[in-house]
């Protein structure tokens, strides 16, 4: 089901932005909705779903190469189109996998409270989606800091 959703999302999500979708909301919205740990878990899950899609595409690419040998000209053209389409989806999902994984790690590295060291227990105070900064407040000691990314 994820893979279907992922393929559908590929059509209207620009490659380099952080897309706004239900499963992977931005940090501030995700923390408000279900807390930091769940947000982080979802980012990792989604990232690994994209890795799976990348692997499936690699298998499919080998498959299209195998059928390429025989057939008429129009069949071969169709194979080329298939090869390019699968390759494009594979590259997109690989980039998405790396982006989600690195983004999740980058944020997780800043999730410790600078004062008391508590991990991942904070509330969102302010967000700046363009600058990618989220102002947060520790739930243990009320200390405030910014998370970039
Ligand atoms: Zn604290």
Image: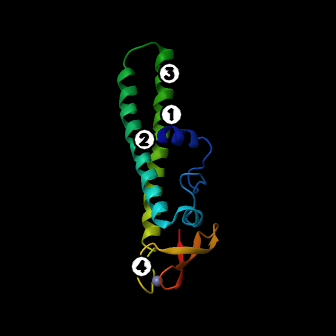
Q: Earlier in the sequence, mark 4 or mark 3?
A: 3
Say whether disc 2 or disc 4 marks the residue closer to the N-terminus.
2
Element on which disc 3 rests: helix
- Say which residue appears at 37% left-offset and 40% top-offset: 55
Q: In the structure shown, which secondary structural element does the residue marked by tag 2 occupy?
A: helix
Q: Residues within 10 Å of mark 2 (few under 14, many from 20)?
A: many
Q: Position of residue 111 (x, y in %)?
A: 45, 73
- In space, the residues marked 1 and 2 are separated at their CA atoms by 13 Å
Q: Which residue is mark 3?
A: 77
- What residue is disc 1 on? 85
Relative to 146, does residue 86 appear above or below in the rendering? Answer: above
Q: Please report contact status of discs 1 and 2: CB closer than 8 Å, yes or no.
A: no
In front of the other: label 3 or label 2? 2
Residue 133, quarter of the rendered image = bottom right
What residue sits right under mark 4 in the picture? 118
Determine which of the numbered discs, if any, sits on residue 53 in the image: 2
Q: Is mark 2 within 8 Å of ligand 1?
A: no
Q: CA distance from mark 3 to mark 2?
A: 24 Å
Q: Which of the two discs, 4 and 3, sits closer to the camera?
A: 4
> In the rendered image of this protein, does residue 134 appear above or below residue 101?
below
Who comes first in sequence, dot 3 or dot 2?
2
Q: Nearer the viewer, mark 2 or mark 4?
A: 4
Packing grade of label 1 (10 A; few <14, some 14-19, many >=20) is some
> Which mark is nearer the camera, 1 or 2?
2
How many marks can you see? 4
Q: CA distance from mark 4 to mark 3?
A: 58 Å
Residues marked 4 and 1 touching at CB (< 8 Å): no
Marks 2/4 in contact by CB < 8 Å: the verdict is no
Local secondary structure at mark 1: helix
Residue at image point 53% right, 68% down: 149
**Does residue 21 lie above or below 67 as drawn?**
below
């Amino acid at each position: 089901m994820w893979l279907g959703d992922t393929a559908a999302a590929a059509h209207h999500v620009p490659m380099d932005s952080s897309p706004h979708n239900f499963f992977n909301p931005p940090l501030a919205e995700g923390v408000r909705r279900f807390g930091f740990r769940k947000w982080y878990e979802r980012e990792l899950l989604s990232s690994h779903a994209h890795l799976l899609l990348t692997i499936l595409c690699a298998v499919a690419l080998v498959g299209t190469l195998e059928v390429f040998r025989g057939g008429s000209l129009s069949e071969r053209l169709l194979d080329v189109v298939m090869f390019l389409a699968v390759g494009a989806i594979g590259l997109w999902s690989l980039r998405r996998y790396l982006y989600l994984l690195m983004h999740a790690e980058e944020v997780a590295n800043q999730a410790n409270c600078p004062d008391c060291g508590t991990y991942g227990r904070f509330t969102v105070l302010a967000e700046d989606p363009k600058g990618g900064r989220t102002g947060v407040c520790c739930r243990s000691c009320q200390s405030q800091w910014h998370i970039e990314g």
